[in-house]
Image (cartoon, rainbow, N blue to C red):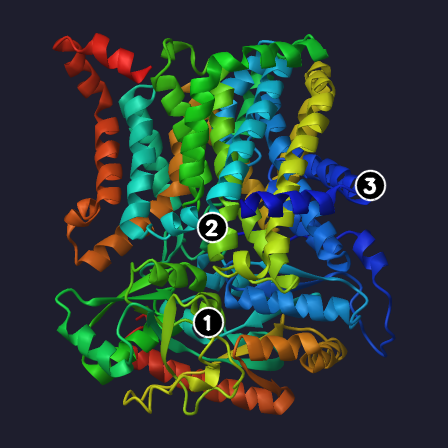
Amino acid sequence: MRIPVKAVGAATALLLSAPAFAGWEPTKPVEIVVAAGAGGASDQMARMMQAAIQKNDLMKQPMVVSLKGGASGAEALMYMKSSEGDPNKVLIAYSLIYMLPLSAKIPFNWRELTPVSVIALDQFVLWDNSAGPKTVKEFVDAAKAAAVPFKMGGTGSKREDHVLTVFLEQKTGAKFSYLPYKSGGEAATQLVGNHTESNVNNPSENLEVWRAGQVRPLCVFDKERIAYTSKVTDTQSWADIPTCKEEGIDVQYLMLRAMFLPGKVTPEQQAFYVELFHKVTQTVEYKDYMEKQALKPIFLTGKDMMQFLEEDDATNKSLMMEAGFVAK
Amino acid sequence: MEAFGLLLHGFAVLLTWKTLVLMMVGLVLGIFVGVLPGLGGPNGVAILLPLTFTMDPTSAIVMLSCIYWGALFGGAITSILFNIPGEAWSVATTFDGYPMAQQGRAAEALTAAFTSSFIGSLVAVLLITFLAPMISSFALKFGPPEFFAVYLLTFCSFVGLGREAKHKTLISMSLGLLLAGIGMDTVSGQLRMTFGSSELLRGINFLVAVIGLFGISEILLTMEERLALRGHAASISLRVVLSVWKDLPKYWVTLLRSSFIGCWLGITPGGAIAASFMGYNLAKRFSKDPESFGKGRIEGVFAPETAAHASGTSALLPMLALGIPGSGTAAILLGGLMVWGLNPGPLLFVEHKDFVWGLIASMYLGNVVGLVLVLTTVPIFASILRVPFAAVAPMIVASCAIGAYAIQNAMFDIWLMLGFGVVGYVFKKIGIPLAPFTLALVLGSRAEDAFRLSMIGSGGELKVFWSNGLVGSITTLAIVLLFWPAIDGLLARIGWMQRSRTISR
């Protein structure tokens, strides 16, 4: 569903007190552009930042969330591309900036945007219904033995969820029918309703149904376990989920969550946002969010960020090639 | 009765002067955004959401749910007065609402719309209050085959029960399905029919199309008919309201049927649109005089409005209980909840009882206060029709353009809207119905996705649509409705006509 979010009137601006900043600062309400649907992981993160900025008075102008999830997020990318020179729009990006141009030949290159900072890394977890197999081994065995292939729910086609499914097939020898839903939330509900046997949602997308005991995390696609040890359900914390590698499936994938401005903005404008998002990562709201949704906190900017992006781009490209998802 | 006690507590919290004032403000703002075509509920709530960040959660919920009610009520106003549906689910309201306004019965139509919105919403809120836990498990039964079956049912009921010539309905529906295919295809991840244009990536927005097809084309037609808007001075007084209410009991079957359809479809995401069309079609089917529908029959306003609002309201249930927004507005409310640190999901009803019941209580109050407020404004809105067309038309065109632009902040959409205006004009001239076209445009890609996901999941077996009682009965019902005229004729021929009529009533 595409929902536009319009600029807020002066009324809201008046409600906010004005912190002092040197140099450039926005003169209009700032739009956080979300390349996904309402309620997905990107949207939740954007709302968190909106609230963190507003509650801690980090910026004079209000911040509004603009959902541009049309065309599997391509809408947001083209919107940023066409907003060259506009410093009042900031994209909350994830791996689609590498993958969409490859799979759907969208005329977009992230190097045309202005990088601000990488603010988090998101995990992927293999989940099944709590009535299903209890361990990775049982799950793989059941998937191999199934007469009709197990259904794997995911978000979008030829994207991170789909790539993970392909690698899961390669490493285990089991076959899955991949069902591309419109959002991670939908993939979660469909798993609870037993319409799929598994999904590879981000922690935030399955958190609530996990807490309600409706789904079970089998393993996390990372080199090491998630660091958070406080209990999420009655018996388990994020740290209790084994890595897929421990369970014999050597597949790893971490997804960036990064902020970008449109191309051709001034260095002062870029510097303002680097500072702003640095402050956001210091807030209680951000820290709580990282822990609750099991994200890896990180803050990269400038050269470090460019290096990270180039490497990440190369990794994603080779994964996409290997999975056979690059359009000819 | 735990639910009842919690609800009463919710009311107690809300009944203060401060909250009542916030309610009024929310409702007025909501009606205002609802009246602007395209701006509608989702945008209204979205624009005003940040206003509530500085409020305490209770005030914020009250304010937001009142904006929501206001926008719902407001949407009916433009549908009836100018043939411009503000929300997808208001399309069916224009079928009889607009003819009524043209016959000088605008006040009557508005009263009917507001009253049935109220009734539909009330039934749905009652449902939420008492059946919440059971209903959310019903919503979980819907996988791709079930979703496809529901969409199929909507399409089939249109073809089978429609008044227009079948081939015209099919032509119109096919064109809509074709346009619905434009943009990114979720299942394959490929672009379709965009011809290298980045504007077409997004696909054709339904509301942009509707504003053009209904609003702009209507202006064109009226201009052709020598600048005379056929709305006449309506008899504007409280008596109209009372006389409509007096006749209400006569339509209890329609109201009940529509409420039922609405609640049923509302808890399956995206069902509100299907509900309003089905409510209308079934009312027509079971009417003694189906010919009079579409020519200004009050039942044709009652049926879709009740269904749309019952489902719009019950759509909040899957949002709260499952975190899946059933409508655009529900999606924005979902965003709001997360800002206040409330994560919608199965545990929300357990961990945040006070919040949930506060919200439900504010839905009752907002609905009642909203009804009173809009009814007192009926005369004002109805009198808009007395303003000369030459003065009103530019304002309508301007507000259509603003609405179309605001949906995605895209200039391209204004051109698209004008293009659809011309298409709508041509369709009306050559007698092709617009409704199947809009229905296909809004449900087409969802139906397609659901069908293809079902096929992937079942390995290409069509049997999946009869794989359990739920999906099997919906699919069968759809096919029966598709061939209804033939079946009906057959029944008549073997002399069962009398009996089937008695049963259906």
Classify A112 as above or below B146.
below
Q: Please give the residue where the numbered disc 1 appears in the rendered image.
A: A96
Q: In the image, what residue occupies the spot 69% across and 20% down?
A: B378
Q: CA distance from mark 3 to mark 2?
A: 32 Å
**Looking at the picture, how far across and down is residue A212, in whole percent?**
45, 66
N-term-proximal mark, 3 vs 2: 3
Chain containing the residue with disc 1:
A
- Residue B383 seen from this side: yes
Q: Please give the residue where the numbered disc 3 appears in the rendered image.
A: B17
Eye-nearest disc, 3 or 2: 3
**Looking at the picture, how far across and down is residue B397, in whole percent?**
64, 31
**Looking at the picture, how far across and down is residue A56, in whole percent?**
77, 72
Q: Amino acid at mark 2?
A: Pro
Chain containing the residue with disc 3:
B
Eye-nearest disc, 2 or 1: 2
Q: In the image, what residue occupies the spot 78% across and 67% down?
A: A26
Q: Which mark is residue B339?
A: none
Q: CA distance from mark 1 to mark 3?
A: 49 Å
- Residue B432 seen from this side: no
Q: Amino acid at mark 3?
A: Trp
Q: CA distance from mark 2 to mark 1?
A: 28 Å
Q: Please give the residue where the numbered disc 2 appears in the rendered image.
A: B318
Q: Amino acid at mark 1?
A: Leu
Q: Secondary structure at mark 3?
A: helix
